[in-house]
Amino acid sequence: MSDAPEKDVRGIKAPRILVMGIGSSGVRAVASMYAINPDLKAVAIDTDAKVLESVTVERNIQVGATITRGMSAGGDIELGRQSIEHDSSNIRKQLQQVDLLVIVAGLGGGTGSGAVPVITRIAREAGSLVLTMVSMPFAFEGKKISRIAEEALKRIRTHADAIVRIPNERLVDRADVELPVEQAFARSHKVMKDGIFSLGRMLSSNGVCSLDFACIRTMLSNCDGFCHFAGAEASGADRAKMVADSLLKHRLLNKGRLLENAEGIIIGLTGGHDLKLAEIEKVMNRLQEKLPEDVWLNFGVAVDPSFEGRLSAIVLVAEQWKTPLVDASRQMGLTFNRNNAQGQGELPLETIGKGEFTYIDPTILNNQDIDVPTYIRRDIKLPR
Amino acid sequence: MANESIAVLEIGTRTVRVLVGEMRDDGVISVVGIGEEPSRGIRKGEIVNRDDAIKCLRKAIKVAEENRRKNIHSVMLITSGGQAEAKKSMGIHKLIDPVDNLPMEVLDEDVAEVVEIARKVALPENRIKLHTLQQYFQLDDSMKVTDLVGMAGEELRVEMLTIHGKRSAVDNFRKLVDDAPIPCTDAVFSGLCSAMAVVGEEQKKAGVLVIDIGAGTTDFALYHDGFVQAAGSFGVGGDHVTNDISIGLQVTHSQAEHLKVKEGSALTNLMEREHSISIPAVSQGFGGKMVRAVTLNTIINARMDEIFNLVKDEIERQSSNVPLSAGVLLTGGGSFLNGARDLGQKIFNVPCTHGKPFEVHGLPSSKQGPLYAAHIGAIRYAASLNKVVEKPSFGKKMIRFFWGGAHE
């Protein structure tokens, strides 16, 4: 955030999360989140002035006003890319001192597919952790659109820590003949919303056994690009069983099959004050029956009074588990040291990764040792 | 002999290259001898092992001499000057007649005087002047006057661009050449030379950026309005790309080099979906490896993107808002990297192509033109100075005379 780091009474800094909605679909998703929770730090970014006008979000940025003249990118990725490059300084300003950036977008259009790869790169350079939640187009939107989305995904992958793909296609099934179109498109928004709110709850202080930022960071930096996400909610006496069952059959988890070969998983549970230990146990046990034994598992429980009588669960699943090529300890330093501006700067004396340039005069430009590979300095995660 | 032959030498991080050429009367340079030798003992354009470096140098000169069947008496040294920088300076000369206090006509002497004043740029001890390039004259309020003898005014100003390099780097190279032993007549900045070879008058006016991506250094020169507006050099080049690959993929330097040349691309979206490259097992202890093209290209892309952006930021700093109407020209070995031109186009947002020397005969193939740009440019530069480089006795005298650079 651009404002001063939030501190609680004891001066402890909480990790800051920023949600960024890009493109018309992303903006609408963010707006619907903001409508529910106005405390959400959210930014809406689009080329289309009309879309931005129609929504209420804390901050909105119109990009590429000179390039698209306030209209949408019209499905042209190149226009989307140019627009965001043009206003990149503004974006950079938004990203100051953000620990976790959640990008929300719909791929397949011009602004979403063109701008997201650029923003992930900027965010990475600014040192934030990037979680990208993108909805993939319906099959009926045509091969061309889905190819654009796939292409964009590949480019996002170079810089984003984790990408959650939400295929619109999987969110509807044959039983939904009567489903109004608005709701069909809003379903992916709801998935994103559930995910972001639950993550927010887990990370904030009201968790009983909350996940900390480091867990999320480990998960995101090790998941080799893609994550899967699913959420479920139930109420009543049998809610624990119902939640577990619906997760195990969840469409976004390929009817639970993804759980069987998961290599990493984060489980987040939210309930009211009436949440019982037995219920947590039940959900966890049911899930662990399916999960492989050596899975990297982390779970958190948050208590929220508004969840009285209900139980909600989210899972974030990684299919692959690989140590990233970028040194994680360095990245950690980048994310957190950045915030204490008063502290004395440390002279980076390490020579890791200089290869054949290790023993000769370093070339220092803009306070950076140019001999260290660019991808290490920019914290670009190499796809393996 | 009607046309003096000129020998130029570049001690690059990858190759030591000697070129002997003659400037013909019609302005065409004909290359009569080429000597190349893979260099050793040079890193990032600076000497790290003098013995190795001098051996390569001798070999290259010998090859060129054999190639030409004639001895080389003296050479002109092309250097990137250990991260050369450019500095603008201004000379002011008052023209007011002391007697009747009226504006005077500009005479040839006044022009010479103001140029001389502007030339005197104070540089730190450790910097050495490579070139002083005269830019615009300014007479009172009329800016950008190019020829003003005969005009009247009160105050005459001239802008100069001084390209200066690291004294130790340049001196070391000169000493190396002198110890070869071959007299070294002058040291010229490679970025400027490359530009002189590949850029025509028209392009100089329209605005053009020439980037010479070598193995150890990246040099650039920016022209607009017919003058050099910015120039400089960074100690980063193709070797850094190779080094990044060898660190990122954990392969040896030579494997990384091979990967870069054969499979690498500076663009990540050119890649195929899940295309993998196999690195065969060559030596003992290395069992071969599969590498994804995405990974390789991501590493290259990050570095090349940085190199271009360094240049972009630097020209923006030295001389902002210069239109690049004639585009960006790439020379040097690094320009042959796949996708380098496309990436350049993306970053500078103007057409980006290979810079090929024109009005030249006798190069091995036109495709390799960008490799020889700096040498051709240096020959042209030497010829334009109209001085005899080949005769050793005269050349010796020239050293002191031209030391500190002469204008273009």
Image (cartoon, rainbow, N blue to C red):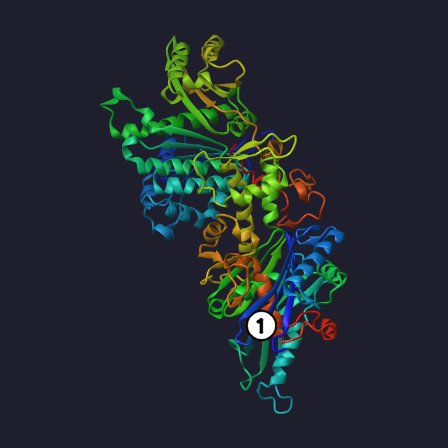
Asked whether A373 or B69 is in front, the reply is: B69
The extreme left residue here reads: A178
Horizontal side of residue B157 vs A289, given as left or right: right
Query: In the rendering, at what x and y percent does residue B401 appear?
Result: 72, 74
Q: Position of residue B371 (x, y in %)?
A: 56, 57
Pointer 1 residue? B23
Query: Between B108 and A132, which is closer to the camera in this rendering?
Result: B108
Residue B73 visible in the snapshot: yes
Work out whether A185 lies above or below A67.
Answer: above
Residue in the picture at 53% in, 53% down? B335
Q: Nearer the viewer, residue B74 or A197?
A: B74
Front residue of A294/A15: it is: A294
The single residue placed furthest to the bottom in the displayed view is B100
Residue type at mark 1 is: Met
Residue at 38% x, 26% y is A191
Rendered location of residue B179, percent (x, y)? 77, 61
**Residue at 35% over, 42% down:** A110
State whether residue A27 appears in this view.
no
